[in-house]
Image (cartoon, rainbow, N blue to C red):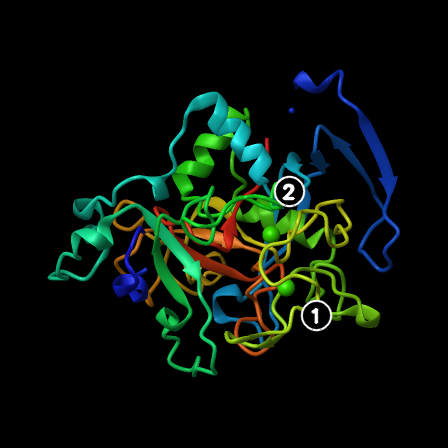
């Protein structure tokens, strides 16, 4: 939801006949099967199959458990997150204005806040977005008061990711950020694509390693190699950038997974088309009653008023000491009408 910092706690192929085609054989060790990846016009064919979604690891978050068997049909998926250059082409051709560039609609906003929440000041209803703004000193993350490191910045949007004084110079190949769900859907429609479902996204991220903790194996940094843009140091104030990037990174800066997809883990979280259900896997396993979607589109007891879509893959802010979301089973709810500086998307078809 578009929100001032005050409310943060309430919040988050076909026409390709003439295209180049490239095939490569995966070189990484220990995936569950041998395969080849095929890339056409920046998309990879993901062969359908069955797999275990979620995890049974005790130290994973409860919203990821238990693992449940799921079937997935084949689909094409963008090799990378949608970049600023790609999004700029969409805007240039359509004149599209993102949600973060529009005045905040208080009537819409208050529907996702506890009843009686006072109306923010007009200044706080100006177009803007949430920007990661780390303190210069250590802060306790125990109470999860995210207003200590997330700030509402008037004038922040996809063209000005850190605020009105910032721009996209040098970030042409970085993932686009400050994108709300409807913005991502508008882009996907223009591109003749759609957003992935949660199950499609996770199947593609696991790439056959469904029983391994990480998308690339069992160790976070195999032989000391950084496999994704995450956060090293003490969250949120001490970002040691040992992986080379403090914020977002150009797409393809880290190795692809075994399906040939880049940055599925880290860089920016990625929107999916599914509404968030915190106990979805327990429902599928028969441990909880089905969600009555006629009453509630989504379910998150920690954020009961928000309408949230599932985001996957973690971001440059996932830290060993705070949020270990750099795993393919990790999932979070994200307000469908909110963009932030660490959430983007990629498309499928
Ligand atoms: Ca980093
Ligand atoms: Ca990502």
Q: Does mark 1's beta carbon lie closer than 8 Å to ligand 1?
A: yes
Q: Which residue is mark 2?
A: 173
* Quarter of the image where the C terminus is located: top right
Q: How far apart are labels 1 and 2 at the CA level?
A: 21 Å
Mark closer to the chain start, 1 or 2:
2
Q: In terms of secondary structure, where does tag 2 sit?
A: loop
Would residue 88 appear left or right of 76 to someone viewing this image?
Answer: left
Q: Which residue is mark 1?
A: 242
Closer to us: 246 or 51:
246
Q: Residues within 10 Å of mark 2 (few under 14, many from 20)?
A: some
Closer to us: 136 or 236:
136
**Quadrant of the rendered structure where residue 55 is?**
bottom right
Would residue 33 appear left or right of 135 to someone viewing this image?
Answer: right
Kindly tell me whether residue 101 is visible in this rendering.
yes
Q: Residues within 10 Å of mark 1 (few under 14, many from 20)?
A: few
Which residue is painted at 70% across and 65% down in the image?
A: 243
Give residue 169's position: percent from left, percent from top. 58, 44
């Amino acid at each position: 939801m578009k929100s001032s910092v005050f409310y943060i706690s309430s919040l988050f192929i076909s026409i390709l006949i003439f295209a180049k085609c490239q095939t490569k054989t995966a070189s990484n060790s220990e995936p569950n099967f041998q395969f080849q990846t095929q890339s056409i016009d920046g998309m990879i064919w993901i062969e359908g199959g069955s797999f275990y979604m979620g995890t049974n690891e005790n130290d994973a978050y409860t919203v990821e458990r238990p693992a449940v068997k799921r079937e997935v049909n084949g689909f094409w998926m963008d090799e990378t997150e949608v970049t600023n250059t790609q999004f700029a082409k969409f805007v240039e051709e359509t004149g599209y204005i993102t949600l973060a560039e529009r005045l905040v609609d208080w009537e819409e906003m208050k529907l996702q806040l506890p009843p009686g929440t006072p109306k923010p000041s007009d200044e706080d209803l100006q177009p803007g977005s949430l920007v990661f703004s780390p303190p210069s000193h250590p802060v306790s993350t125990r109470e999860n008061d995210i207003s200590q490191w997330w700030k509402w910045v008037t004038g922040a949007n996809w063209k000005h990711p850190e605020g009105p004084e910032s721009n996209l110079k040098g970030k042409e190949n970085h993932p686009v950020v400050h994108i709300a769900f409807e913005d991502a859907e508008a882009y996907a429609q223009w591109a003749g694509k759609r957003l992935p479902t949660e199950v499609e996204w996770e199947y593609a991220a696991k790439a056959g390693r469904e029983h391994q903790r990480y998308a690339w194996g069992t160790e976070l940094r195999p032989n000391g190699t950084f496999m994704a843009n995450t956060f090293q140091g003490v969250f949120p104030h001490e970002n040691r950038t040992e992986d080379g990037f403090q914020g977002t990174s150009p797409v393809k800066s880290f190795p692809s997974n075994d399906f040939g997809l880049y940055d599925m883990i880290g860089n920016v979280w990625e929107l999916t088309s599914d509404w968030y259900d915190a106990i979805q896997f327990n429902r599928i396993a028969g441990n909880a009653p089905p969600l009555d979607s006629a009453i509630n589109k989504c379910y998150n007891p920690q954020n009961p008023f928000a309408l949230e879509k599932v985001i996957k893959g973690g971001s440059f802010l996932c830290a060993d000491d705070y949020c270990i979301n750099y795993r393919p089973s990790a999932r979070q709810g994200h307000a469908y009408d909110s963009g932030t500086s660490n959430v983007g998307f990629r498309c499928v078809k």
